[in-house]
Amino acid sequence: MTAGLAAAEDVLTVGAARRRLASRLQSGWSSGAGSAALDARLLLAHALGVEAMSLPLRDGEAVPIEAMAAAEALVARRARGEPVARLLGYKEFWSLRFDLSAGTLVPRPDTETIVATALDRIAAAGQRGDPLRLLDLGTGSGCILLALLSELPAAVGVGVDRSTDAVNTAAANAERFGLGDRARFVAGNWADGLAGPFDAILANPPYVEGADLPDLPIEVIGHDPRLALDGGPDGLGAYREIIPELPRCLALGGFAALEFGPRQAGPISELAGRAGLDAEIRRDLAGRERVALLTIRSAKT
Ligand code: GLN
């Protein structure tokens, strides 16, 4: 009886739990302090099994003791640098909820620039309803390909990844979104062995310079797969493999949209030029050069 009463006194309201978890995050981990309130809300909602959006409406409700223990364990992992997306097991991208696994990069908002660039180009060509063939190289969770398929009702696509774990995760995401019949995921090395042709080729390849890897935030280097980050000594290794393959794989009138990192627009445009491709650079929402739109160079007279 006494134990029961003591336990009852320990029961917090959602509002108090939220504040307690946020302040623990704020003091426990300086680099995560900026998002402490939001992270606490997401992790508490996860532990309670409710939508994070609904949490403020539940401020007066009691948090069961087991849920509070689960939330505290998640917050402790967060305070050691584990990303919220890894703790939840999913990340939203293009308004779709992508499940993650060890072999997938956490989708970044920056990468939506590829989706937007491809859709712009397809819409400008009046092809939104066409049975386009898409190829996503280094597909990870499948986020680029599946976001595009969700917008293009007649398109089909292939996603390739060197990691079979990623291939399985992407295929499961496709099924969950009801896109399984229009998406295939295969293990492979870039476009090796793929015949094509493809109307659009998309890729967010690894592009971090080898020497910069140790300086990446713990959330990235400690939790994203190195295969998805490490672009070799100058960060351009993947582009040297992918770009020369594009003329062989692209359909007439097709295009490629490749994400890249800081200071890479110049070298990528040069690699494209050598492969007979024209490059147009697109910026992300923060105004940074982010995506190269590549097309077969038209014969000029
Ligand atoms: N943009 C990623 C980052 O935040 C890098 C991903 C990549 O190399 N494609 O580190």
Image: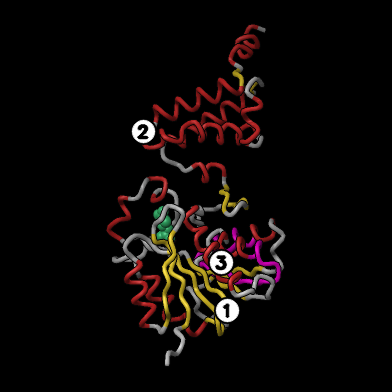
* Residue depth check, mark 2 versus mark 1: number of the one nearer the observer: 1
Magenta residues, as a range? 149-171
Relative to 88, is 6 above or below? Answer: above
**Relative to residue 249, is residue 7 drawn left or right?**
right
Circle 1: is it few (<14), some (14-19), or many (20+) Cα within 10 Å?
A: many
Instruction: Give the image quarter of residue 264.
Output: bottom left
Q: Position of residue 265 (x, y in %)?
A: 35, 67
Position of the N terminus, as image quadrant, is top right
**Kind of residue at badge 3:** Asp
* Residue depth check, mark 3 versus mark 2: number of the one nearer the observer: 3
* Mark 2 to mark 1 CA distance (whole Å): 46 Å
Circle 2: is it few (<14), some (14-19), or many (20+) Cα within 10 Å?
A: few
Colour scheme of the picture: secondary structure
Secondary structure category for the residue under label 2? helix
**Kind of residue at badge 1:** Phe
Which residue corresponds to mark 1?
Answer: 198
Q: Is residue 290 visible?
A: yes
Q: Give the label on residue 120, or none.
A: 3
Which callout, 1 or 3, points at the residue further toward the start of the chain? 3
Q: Position of residue 218 (x, y in %)?
A: 38, 45
Which residue corresponds to mark 2?
Answer: 30
**Kind of residue at badge 2:** Ser
